Image (cartoon, helix red, strand yellow):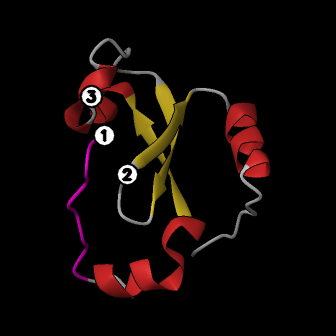
Amino acid sequence: MAHIEKTPTNAPFSVEEFLALGGEDIVYRRRLTGKELKAFLPEAKNAPEAQVFEALFGADGTPLLVTDDKRSLANWLDEAGMDMALRH
């Protein structure tokens, strides 16, 4: 699994603070193109560059799910017993 080491300078929490919030209970969603996906996930080397994917990551940056189907994402969250919260 790939580990993403990217912390924006304006992040409301440090990495340690974010992990302390819920560890495995918090995931974040990110929309990526195939090109972006290939940049950090070697397993996606054959992904079409223009295709848009939905990805779920653990609080530590571990990829948990990559899909091109929003229903799969919703099913994963439901099966994991998680609810979605929006961050603005």
Q: Callout 3: helix, strand or loop? A: helix
Amino acid type at mark 1: Met
Q: Distance between the residues labelled 2 and 3?
A: 15 Å
Contact between labelled residues 3 and 1, with CB atoms less than 8 Å apart: no
Disc 2 designates what residue?
Answer: 62
Give me the disc on residue 38: 3
Which residues are drawn in magenta? 1-9
In this image, 70 relative to 41: left or right?
right
Residue 69 is situated, as x and y percent measured from the top left of the image, at 66, 28
Contact between labelled residues 3 and 2, with CB atoms less than 8 Å apart: no
Mark 3: few/some/many CA within 10 Å (<14, 14-19, 20+): some
Residue 1 is situated, as x and y percent measured from the top left of the image, at 30, 40
Q: Quadrant of residue 27?
A: bottom right
In this image, 19 relative to 84: left or right?
left
Q: Which residue corresponds to the image point at 26% horizontal and 43% vertical from the top-left?
A: 2
Disc 1 designates what residue?
Answer: 1
Q: Which residue corresponds to the image point at 77% horizontal and 39% vertical from the top-left?
A: 75
Mark 1: few/some/many CA within 10 Å (<14, 14-19, 20+): few
Amino acid type at mark 2: Thr
Assign the C terminus to one quadrant of the image: bottom right
Amino acid type at mark 3: Lys
Contact between labelled residues 1 and 2, with CB atoms less than 8 Å apart: yes
Q: In which quarter of the image is residue 20?
A: bottom left
Mark 2 vs 1, N-terminal side: 1
Look at the magenta stretch and give its main secondary structure. Answer: loop
Q: Callout 2: helix, strand or loop? A: loop
Q: Callout 1: helix, strand or loop? A: loop
- Let me know if residue 8 is in the magenta part: yes
